[in-house]
Image (cartoon, rainbow, N blue to C red):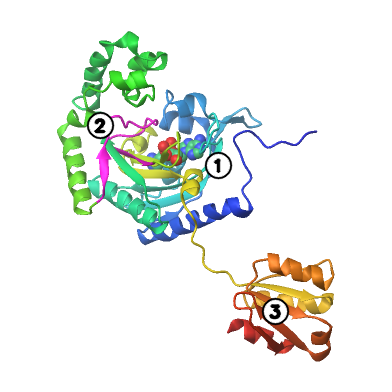
């Protein structure tokens, strides 16, 4: 049998996992400042949770889900995103019974059967947050400010926010706009790509975010949805815009931004980076006030986002706190392990050579180990009960008593 990793997946270890741990740690810290607490939902759910919530006609549900069958023939799906799972959990866990607001964040693997390329995987990682119960633009603002704060904390520049509103389901809002848009698109129906020609019928808004250059040109003068939404949606968006101005959040309005998941209404947004190539969306989200109803639960307004961790990892340089690392050089196994144990108890990362190699080889390993301190117990030290301690940064060397090693390391 030839072992092979599955296409579009990867093993993360050594240097590759460092940015992930860093980004997750920073997210936990910042999100908790805003009152969010972590939720971990299963990585698989019943397939209809996603089909129903994300939308049967979306690429994610139609083409990209990894499906499983359990032993009783029930269809399960590896989660392609986490919003549907979190909403399911809020409903099944009855979380809104005691609260009128709920703030949750999550991080973990998601699965989509997409064509792998730079920044795009079949198993990828997201960090996301969802705020339930706040219908006013305060929710939209809170999450956008939290994101900006997070980006600042990881020193991520060169990202831009793009915003749009896609209106609501009231007849004078998105449905009326769709009619106007379809009339406009049909004037040039045959000139659109094949995919868009189908979408004019099934999901006309998605024609606006087609990446095909001729489709982009054809929609340049299409009606802009933010100019055609109902009064409530317009007021909501205007208020959000003035709040963003107050907080000096920079963004651009993008009438093409419609998102690839069906549960949104009102505000939607994405975050882009110029340094990522084709897969330049670092994250996205928006308001989804109808999803609870869609699942047959009491209506609860909601707003959330998710960031692509694999993409963020390409953009950030972790700033890691200095670690205290020691290397013990000694040919007496009992003594070496005793000193190593003392180092670890004093909270030093500690390495030694378990193979009892020559002292020369151990010195070589110590030099390569990026240790701050090297503790040497050669023949002389073993006889006299001393340890030679070399500071690898300054080159300074001192001799201490073996029983004083713990105290010395705690200095
Ligand atoms: P999404 O836009 O589908 O939204 O995904 C969010 C981010 O996940 C993307 O911007 C991208 O950075 C990353 N991503 C998506 N697919 C891949 C992939 N195949 N490989 C690597 N990264 C990927 C959502 O998932 C919504 N649940 C966001 C949300 C939360 N809306 C409301 N609440």
Residue located 61% across and 38% down the image: 9
Q: Quadrant of the N terminus?
A: top right
- Local secondary structure at mark 3: helix
Gap between marks 2 and 1 measured at Cα: 30 Å
Q: Earlier in the sequence, mark 2 or mark 3?
A: 2
Above or below, 162 against 28 in this view is above
Residue identifier under label 3: 342
For the question of whether residue 260 can be seen, the reply is yes
As for residue 366 lying within the magenta part, the answer is: no
Q: Which residue is mark 2?
A: 168
- In this rendered view, identify the residue nearer to me: 199 or 106: 199
Q: In the shown orientation, is residue 35 left or right of residue 318? A: left
**Kind of element beneath mark 2:** loop
The quadrant holding residue 178 is top left
> Whole-Å distance between the Cαs marked 2 and 3?
64 Å
Residue 66 x/y as whole percent: 57, 31
Which residue is drawn at the image coordinates 69% and 82% (left, top)? 389
């Amino acid at each position: 049998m030839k072992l092979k990793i599955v296409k579009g997946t990867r093993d993360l270890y050594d240097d590759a996992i460092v940015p992930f741990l860093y980004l997750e740690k920073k997210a936990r810290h910042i999100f908790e400042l805003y009152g969010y607490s972590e939720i971990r939902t299963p990585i698989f759910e019943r397939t209809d949770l996603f089909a129903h919530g994300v939308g049967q006609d979306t690429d994610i549900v139609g083409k990209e889900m990894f499906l499983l069958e359990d032993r009783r023939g029930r269809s399960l799906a590896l989660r392609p995103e986490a919003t549907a799972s979190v909403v399911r959990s809020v409903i099944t866990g009855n979380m809104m019974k005691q609260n009128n607001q709920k703030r949750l964040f999550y991080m973990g693997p998601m699965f989509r059967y997409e064509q792998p390329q730079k920044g795009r995987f079949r198993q990828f990682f997201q960090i996301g947050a969802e705020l339930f119960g706040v219908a006013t633009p305060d929710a939209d603002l809170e999450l956008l400010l939290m994101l900006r704060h997070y980006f600042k904390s990881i020193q991520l520049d060169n990202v831009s926010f793009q915003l749009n509103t896609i209106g609501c389901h009231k007849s004078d809002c998105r449905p009326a706009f769709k009619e106007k848009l379809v009339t406009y698109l049909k004037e040039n129906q045959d000139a659109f790509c094949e995919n868009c020609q189908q979408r004019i019928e099934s999901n006309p808004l998605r024609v606006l975010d087609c990446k095909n250059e001729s489709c982009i040109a054809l929609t340049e003068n299409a009606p802009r949805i933010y100019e055609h939404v109902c009064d409530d949606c317009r007021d909501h968006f205007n208020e959000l815009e003035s709040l963003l101005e107050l907080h000096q959040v920079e963004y651009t309005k993008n009438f093409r931004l419609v998102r690839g998941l069906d549960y949104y209404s009102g505000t939607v947004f994405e975050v882009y980076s110029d340094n990522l190539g084709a897969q330049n969306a670092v994250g996205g989200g928006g308001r989804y006030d109808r999803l609870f109803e869609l699942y047959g639960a009491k209506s609860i307004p909601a707003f959330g986002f998710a960031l692509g961790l694999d993409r963020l990892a390409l953009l950030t340089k972790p700033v890691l706190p200095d670690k205290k690392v020691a290397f013990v050089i000694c040919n007496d196994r009992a003594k070496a392990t005793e000193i190593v144990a003392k180092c670890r108890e004093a909270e030093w990362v500690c390495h030694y050579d378990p193979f009892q190699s020559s002292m020369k080889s151990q010195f070589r390993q110590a030099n390569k180990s990026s240790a701050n301190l090297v503790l040497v117990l050669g023949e002389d030290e073993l006889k006299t009960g001393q340890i030679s301690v070399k500071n690898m940064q300054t080159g300074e060397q001192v001799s201490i008593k073996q029983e004083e090693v713990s105290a010395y390391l705690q200095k």
